[in-house]
Image: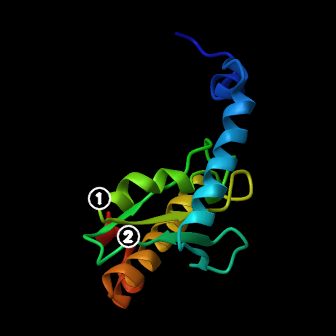
């Protein structure tokens, strides 16, 4: 299969009837979930305006940490669209971190990977009590 228009190939929303309604529902569901849970919002993991993550803690000691890195083909959305997706892991006693990151074209995908790694390390430090996660080289994590 030959793709002539890569922008169109990745524009799923343009090919799903009522896609904008889904996005509106996500925003509403995520906001309601944040309001109903004791989330720690906009925790900073770096100097950029999108270097923030939300942290959801379960009732009781977490068994670990799940990090939900949002989609959007590196060009759209942020953490605030997906909060309600933390419900399942929280019910299973997992903490959930949801980071935002700088979007393309303001940075490269490689930079997004580095930002996400820093967000994971910052969240892990809070949940696992290991501040040394922040100093582990990228290659050691991956």
- Residue 95 rendering spot, x and y as whole percentages: 38, 68
33 or 79: nearer the eye? Answer: 33
CB atoms of marks 1 and 2 within 8 Å:
yes
Q: Earlier in the sequence, mark 1 or mark 2?
A: 2
91 lies left or right of 117 = left
Q: Quadrant of residue 44?
A: bottom right
66 or 9: nearer the eye? Answer: 66
- Residue 19 rendering spot, x and y as whole percentages: 70, 27
36 lies left or right of 105 = left
Secondary structure under the numbered disc 1 in the rendered image: loop
Identify the residue position indicated by label 2 in the image: 58
Identify the residue at image location x=73%, y=51%.
105
Report the colour scheme.
Answer: rainbow
Q: Quadrant of residue 60?
A: bottom left
Identify the residue at image location x=50%, y=71%.
55
Which quadrant is the C terminus positioned in?
bottom left
Secondary structure under the numbered disc 2 in the rendered image: loop
70 or 30: nearer the eye? Answer: 30
- Disc sitting over residue 67 in the figure: none
Identify the residue position indicated by label 1 in the image: 92
Identify the residue at image location x=56%, y=78%.
45
Disc 1 from disc 2: Cα separation: 8 Å
- Residue 111 rendering spot, x and y as whole percentages: 58, 62
């Amino acid at each position: 299969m030959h793709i002539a228009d890569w922008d169109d190939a990745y524009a799923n929303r343009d090919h799903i009837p009522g896609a904008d309604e889904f996005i509106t529902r996500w925003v509403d569901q995520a906001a309601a979930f944040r309001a109903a849970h004791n989330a720690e919002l906009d925790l900073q993991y770096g100097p950029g305006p999108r270097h923030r993550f939300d942290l959801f803690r379960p009732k009781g000691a977490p068994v670990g940490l799940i990090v939900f890195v949002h989609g959007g083909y590196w060009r759209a959305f942020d953490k605030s669209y997906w909060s309600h997706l933390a419900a399942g892991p929280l019910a299973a006693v997992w903490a959930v971190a949801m980071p935002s990151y700088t979007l393309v074209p303001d940075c490269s995908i490689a930079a997004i990977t580095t930002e996400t790694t820093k967000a994971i390390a910052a969240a892990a430090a809070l949940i696992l009590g290991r501040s040394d996660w922040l100093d582990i080289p990228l290659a050691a994590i991956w």
